[in-house]
Amino acid sequence: VAAEAGTLFLGLDAGGTKTAAGVVTPAGEVLSHVRISTAELRLGDALANLIELGRRAMADAGVERVAAVGAALPGPADAAELRLLAAPTIPEWEHVSLAAPLREAFRCPVAGDNDANAAALGEARFGAGRGRSQVVYFTVSTGIGGGIVADGRIFRGARGTSAELGHQVILPEGGPPCGCGGHGCLEALASGRGIAARARQALGVPSGEPFSAEDAARLARAGNTAALRVWEDTALYLGIGVCNAVNLLDPEVVVLGGGVATGAADLLLPGVRRVVAERCMPRLARPVEVVTAELGPAVGVVGAACLAMAAVEGAEL
Ligand SMILES: [Zn+2]
């Protein structure tokens, strides 16, 4: 039996490639989930299209109103005003406050944050970190992002741009260039893009030929030694990144999400766990669990809904 309409939450997830909306119960159950490409969202007025998508999700769930709306945004954001500080995928939203128009459209409280923080909160409340209050979340997909949940709340830092877990320097000498301007960052090595680049080199794939991390995974599973080596190195780099986070934050659980970490968990998770066991400070390595995310493609919508729940609870998340 669905909860009463007034206790349901709308999650909006404006991602780099896909934009989704869904109605979520206070228990984290997804009642509706609609998705379009972010390219489609950007045809005409992106904000009007996002509101329309939210209304479609509400119609699908058979509700006319929700208790609050949460938004997961594709970049570092001022959480109070839902204002993106940088928005490479939806540039028309850069420095624009989305809070007032969303509040007006849905006539309820609104809340938001960047997508990695929202996902971290979603996994901490209803996914692989449920029941825990100290959770570190890595999202490993095209790039690498992260979120820190400390005492059950998102740790935001001074300007709301904390938890750039993908920009830890893993190889200070000779590491590949990173999108942030640095070299040898975790993202440059172990993101989907980084893995594909290293595998391309290791396997001698011609530069004109399309080749992805998925292709590298397929080859590794077929027993290709060079491809297996690429994944071993990836697990080492990611494992060191996880160790740094564990030594710094002493979490109960580290959740690895994103398409690469969940899609290639068979190739990554055992190695990452081994690196953590071998390299973390022993009193920290033993109790920490390293697990893959559980919420799948709905993580953004559930995470956004968690932000909405916090807005209603009056909690400072
Ligand atoms: Zn970087």
Image (cartoon, rainbow, N blue to C red):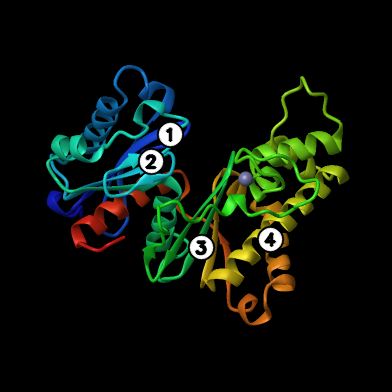
- Label 1 or label 4, whichever lies nearer to me, is 1
* Residue 200, placed above or below residue 186: above
**How far across and how far down the image is residue 229, in percent?**
83, 49
What is the x, y in percent for residue 181? 63, 40
The local crowd at label 3, few if under 14, some if 14 to 19, many if 20 or more residues have their Cα within 10 Å, is many
In the image, 71: left or right of 107?
right
**Viewer-proximal residue among 217 and 104:** 104
Residue bearing mark 4: 239
- The answer for how far apart the CA atoms under marks 2 and 1 are is 9 Å
The answer to which quarter of the image holds residue 245 is bottom right
Q: Which mark is residue 136?
A: 3
What distance separates the C-alpha of mark 4 from that of mark 2? 27 Å
Q: Earlier in the sequence, mark 1 or mark 4?
A: 1
Q: Which quarter of the image is occupied by the C terminus?
A: bottom left
Whether pointer 2 and pointer 1 mark residues with C-beta atoms closer than 8 Å, the reply is: yes
Q: Amino acid at mark 1?
A: Ala
Q: Residue 33: percent from the left, percent from the top?
A: 33, 39
Which disc, if any, is residue 73? Answer: 2
State the CA–CA distance, disc 2 to disc 3: 19 Å
Q: Residues within 10 Å of mark 2 (few under 14, many from 20)?
A: many
N-terminal-most mark, 2 or 1: 2
